[in-house]
Image (spheres, grey):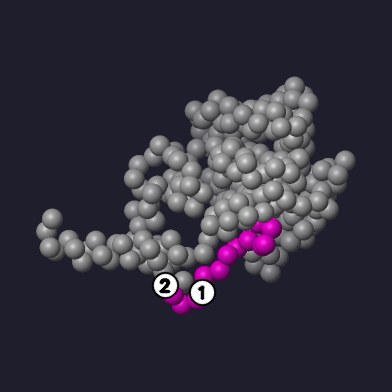
Amino acid sequence: MSLYLVPLLILMSIMEFTLRSIPNEFKYKNTYLKENGDKIQTLILGNSHSYYGIDPDYFEENCFNASQVSQPLEYDEGILRYFENDLSSLNTVILNISAFSLFYDFETSDEPWRNKNYVLYYGMKHQNSYKDNSEVFSMRFSVNLRRISNYVNDRHSLTCSENGWGNDYTSEKSKDLAESALKAAKKHNVTNYDHFDKNKKYLESIIDWCKKRKIKIILYTAPATKDYYQLIHPEQLKTTTDYLKKIAKTSDNCQYVNFLKSEEYSSEDFYDADHLNEKGVKKLSMKMADLVKK
């Protein structure tokens, strides 16, 4: 090895160590699930629509939000299996299914780097490249420098509450609904169904996992603005809702609730076109807590 590479390797090692030292939601939730998993009765899974959408504080029984931004069904299933022995008191799983959930895959999205969070901080295995085992190699150098700078200058903080809810989408920071709808719909509309069968298997595996343990599962689609859902391909929505209705009908431990076009939510309840703010979160959380209680 050339001596010229030694300083570079030292720098990369220091960066890797520093980046892994930064507090993040994955490290926090991993620790919480391992230390408190035996007390959790209701577990919330899903992507950002549930991460920012359901606050466990509104539930009567012990509840935790294990959702993450862009979390695919592959990792929803992975969390249940990985923490299986820790979730000894679990009786209900709430799982968000968005318009894109059954068609989504990290590898073909613009977010393959998110795999490393599950590998590094949950200890899950993934068949992807060496990048999944490294902070340095999975993110752009400029992004990592900014993350380290924020950490060193104490400008970094967790974006979730003690119970795992993403609490930084507030009404004070709300986005333009029409503009954000265009951006979200562009990202969420699918051009092919290549991953549909695979994601159905993940979902059916989740339902089967719950059934074997006498755990009920509530599937739901989160509320969104008219600006947003009118831009989502109608066939995509129909394929999703038809499948979810069918699987709920044929699984006695499962129910499906569709809030996507619910008129209970006004523009004042949204942070952006497809995410609730704290006002909308209160409405949805109380609604889901009532479903669990019933």
Residue 187 visible in the snapshot:
yes
Instruction: Find residue 106 and name its label.
Output: none
- Give the Cα separation between the discs numbered 1 and 2: 8 Å
Q: Quadrant of the C terminus?
A: top right
Q: Nearer the viewer, residue 166 or 36?
A: 36
Please state the horizontal and vertical placement of residue 78, each as a whole percent of the image: 56, 39
N-term-proximal mark, 1 vs 2: 2
Mark 1 residue element = loop
Vertically, is 237 above or below 11?
A: above
Residue at point 82%, 43% (across, down): 292
Q: Is residue 35 magenta?
A: no
Q: Which residue is mark 2?
A: 149
Q: Which residue is mark 1?
A: 155
Task: Please identify the dominant SS of the magenta region.
Answer: loop
Q: Nearer the viewer, residue 116 or 281?
A: 116
- Check if mark 1's residue and mark 2's residue have beta carbons within 8 Å: yes
- The region drawn magenta spans 152-165
| Mark 2 neighbour density, 10 Å: few (under 14) some (14–19) many (20 or more) | few
Mark 2 residue element = helix
Q: Nearer the viewer, residue 65 or 229?
A: 65
Please state the horizontal and vertical placement of residue 180, each as a whole percent of the image: 60, 54
Q: Inspect the image, locate mark 1, and give the three-letter code of the amino acid beneath it.
A: Arg
Q: Inspect the image, locate mark 2, and give the three-letter code of the amino acid beneath it.
A: Ser
